[in-house]
Image (cartoon, rainbow, N blue to C red):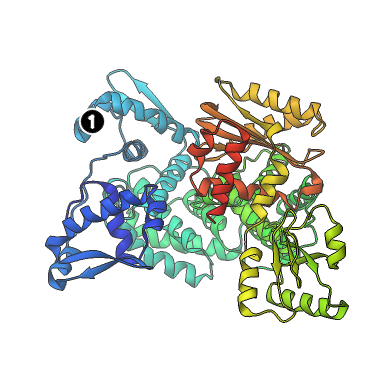
């Protein structure tokens, strides 16, 4: 069965494994639910001749229903030969990278354009991405007239680059011809897999599934490169444990028949490094002899305490986890071994506070070391530090409902009602207990609502009348007020205001915008003069663009005297690194509100999840912005 577009093929693959509703499919494929329905109609038209269809079950989602098992079985048994022609820009870049990394001769774009049925100008445009990818590994492409283009760089860098590329392709499309035909010999991965598993099991080497898969791909790359006459010649060796040395030696013995050539000591040394870099340490922290790792853990935790008020130095579990991870991380960075982090974008979007804390600490440490810690490695550290924050702090800050309790039946009745309410709704915070007369004297109510045993005149907040022994109906009515999300609306009320709201009617660059906003905040006493340079420094490290055109510029650390969010809407867009920001929130957070900071970040994650960028961008004043924001929050 041939699909008219790639999304239908992906949709078919996803729904064969699980039942999914329209909303989830729309999120996964970044389309509207209307597009999902259109795609499902097209998919069912294709499946009609194969005896199957997808049926929408209410409350569950699309389910596969097979009307003719024999015809659908034939469809499942068919395995169309992969088409070795790239169809998208991403595919072309990957194919070009594979060709350059595996070619033993110069390549000409004219030849590739004829083979792939695209213009030379198209491939020339793709070469910018190819050169940028190769540049991360210090690899270069040189062009000679009439001869074409050829890749230059160290053999270790070529292998690392090719392995990283194939690992990423394996995660996205494991049946890609780049894995099975272009870069690796057909069937080689399947042939190597039992050899590696036997080797690692025999020598008690613990690896994650991703780590074992990565080493499998690396060994397949090594087999090809050695057999084609491109051995490693670096004799250096990393100090590793006896079990890693034994496993590397055993693995070389297993690979030798596949290579058909002698395998040098340098190959075995490099295998040691790759195994050690991905090994899961089983030792207790006290047995890990890694001074650098220990010093780095101390520095990171001290920096977080000094600049963000989060005291994590006494968390022995966090220290043990960081030591175990950082020991192998230092080996990776020393030898420029890159481990892709498939969760990086999710980590940045859903754990922005923990990401910023970790990024600031690692960047500060990086000023005193020759090592460069990649974003992928930082993402892994974020998970450890994020868990530590959750263990010790209310980083998932929630504003519990504040309640005023009014009762004229005596102290014992009041205490009984209060105990009953807290048993039913433990999140209630009773701020005051008043008589009816005291209540009437108040001009307004600061709490979220009032619970009373007698009928009262409403002031500025709702009143819930409740019997001393409330009925289930009364408790349900109370629940409608208790269970409302007050955290995000509270953050919106507390940290956003019309004074710190701006619509950019004309294009402006990022630097000028920072200067303008920070100057106003400094004049109003929210920040000092060191705030703006810190915002610029933070932006230079990694872009603060959260996604969907939403940017969150902020300082390294909690430098503000008072917390505030400056909202900027830019219909014309502001250049933000390689992308464009249209909704910008400049964060100025003080150490006093550091525990509420996570909930502030959660607001922006909500805007992202609700895809509210276009609606926010089109607001012309603070009132309309606040209305759109509240509408997004009410959907949760």
| Residue at horizontal 33 percent and vertical 55 percent from the top | 174
Residue in front for this viewpoint, 528 or 629: 629
| Residue at horizontal 18 percent and vertical 53 percent from the top | 81
> In the rendering, at what x and y percent does residue 55 appear?
26, 65
| Residue at horizontal 71 percent and vertical 73 percent from the top | 466
Mark 1 lies on a secondary structure that is loop
Residue in front for this viewpoint, 202 or 535: 535
- Which quadrant holds the C terminus? bottom right
Residue in front for this viewpoint, 517 or 77: 517
Residue 496 in view: yes
597 is higher (above) or lower (below) than 390: above
The quarter of the picture where residue 56 lies is: bottom left
Residue 339 in view: no
> In the rendering, at what x and y percent does residue 416 appear?
80, 80
- Estimate how packed mark 1 is, as few (under 14), some (14 to 19) or many (20 or more) residues with alpha carbons within 10 Å: some
Residue in front for this viewpoint, 607 or 270: 607
- Which quadrant holds the N terminus? bottom left
> In the rendering, at what x and y percent does residue 196 appear?
42, 64
Left or right, 119 with respect to 628, comes to left
Left or right, 630 with respect to 306, comes to left
Left or right, 34 with respect to 219, comes to left
Q: Circle 1 sits on which residue?
A: 118
Left or right, 618 with respect to 496, comes to left
| Residue at horizontal 83 percent and vertical 62 percent from the top | 439
> In the rendering, at what x and y percent does residue 433 appear?
84, 67
């Amino acid at each position: 069965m041939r699909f008219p577009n790639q999304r239908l093929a992906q949709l078919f693959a996803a729904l064969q494994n699980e039942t999914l509703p329209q909303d989830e499919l729309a999120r996964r494929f970044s389309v509207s639910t209307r597009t999902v329905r259109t795609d499902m109609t097209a998919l069912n038209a294709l499946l009609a001749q194969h005896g199957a269809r997808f049926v929408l079950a209410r409350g569950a989602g699309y389910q596969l229903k097979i009307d003719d098992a024999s015809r659908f079985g034939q469809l499942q048994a068919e395995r169309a030969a992969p088409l070795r022609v790239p169809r998208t820009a991403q595919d072309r870049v990957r194919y070009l990278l594979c060709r350059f990394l595996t070619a033993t001769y110069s390549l000409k774009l004219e030849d590739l354009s004829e083979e792939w049925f695209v213009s030379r100008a198209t491939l020339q445009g793709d070469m910018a991405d190819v050169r940028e990818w190769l540049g991360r590994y210090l690899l270069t492409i040189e062009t000679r007239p009439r001869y074409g283009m050829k890749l230059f760089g160290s053999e270790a860098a070529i292998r690392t680059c090719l392995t990283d590329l194939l690992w990423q392709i394996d995660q996205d499309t494991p049946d890609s011809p780049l894995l099975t035909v272009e870069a690796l010999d057909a069937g080689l991965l399947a042939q190597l897999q039992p050899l590696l598993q036997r080797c690692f099991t025999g020598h008690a080497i613990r690896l994650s599934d991703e780590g074992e898969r990565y080493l499998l791909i690396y060994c397949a790359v090594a087999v090809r490169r050695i057999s084609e006459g491109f051995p490693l010649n670096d004799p250096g060796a990393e100090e590793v444990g006896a079990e890693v040395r034994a496993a590397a030696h055993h693995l070389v013995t297993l690979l030798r028949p596949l290579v058909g050539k002698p395998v040098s000591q340098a190959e075995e040394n490099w295998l040691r490094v790759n195994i050690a870099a991905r090994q899961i340490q089983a030792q207790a922290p006290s047995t890990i002899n890694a001074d650098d790792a220990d010093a780095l853990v101390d520095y990171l935790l001290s920096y977080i305490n000094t600049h963000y008020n989060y005291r994590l130095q006494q968390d022995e579990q966090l220290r043990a986890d960081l030591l175990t991870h950082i020991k192998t991380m230092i080996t990776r960075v020393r030898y420029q071994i890159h481990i892709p982090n498939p969760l990086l974008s999710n980590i940045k979007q859903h754990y922005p506070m923990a990401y910023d804390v970790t990024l600031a600490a690692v960047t500060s440490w990086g000023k005193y070391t020759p090592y460069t810690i990649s974003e992928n490695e930082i993402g892994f550290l974020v998970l450890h530090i994020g868990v530590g924050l959750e263990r010790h702090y209310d980083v998932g800050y929630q504003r519990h409902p504040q309640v005023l309790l009014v009762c004229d039946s005596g102290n014992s009745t009041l205490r009984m009602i209060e105990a009953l309410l807290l048993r039913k709704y433990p999140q209630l915070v009773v701020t005051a207990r008043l008589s009816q007369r005291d209540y009437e004297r108040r001009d307004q109510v600061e709490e979220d609502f009032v619970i009373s045993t007698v009928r009262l005149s409403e002031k500025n907040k709702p009143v819930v009348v409740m019997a001393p022994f409330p009925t289930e109906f009364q408790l349900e009515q109370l629940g409608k007020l208790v269970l409302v999300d007050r955290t995000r609306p509270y953050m919106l009320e507390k940290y956003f205001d019309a004074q710190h709201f701006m619509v950019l009617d004309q294009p402006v660059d990022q630097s000028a915008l920072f200067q303008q906003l920070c100057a106003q905040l400094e004049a109003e006493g929210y920040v000092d003069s060191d705030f703006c340079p810190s915002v610029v420094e933070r932006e230079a490290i990694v872009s603060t663009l959260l996604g969907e055109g939403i940017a969150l510029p902020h300082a390294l650390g909690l430098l503000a005297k008072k917390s505030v969010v400056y909202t900027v809407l830019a219909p014309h867009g502001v250049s933000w690194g390689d992308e464009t920001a249209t909704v910008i929130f400049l964060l100025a957070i003080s150490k006093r509100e550091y525990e509420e900071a996570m909930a502030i970040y959660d607001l922006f994650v909500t805007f992202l999840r609700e895809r509210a960028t276009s609606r926010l961008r089109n607001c012309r004043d603070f009132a309309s912005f606040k209305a759109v924001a509240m509408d997004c929050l009410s959907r949760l």
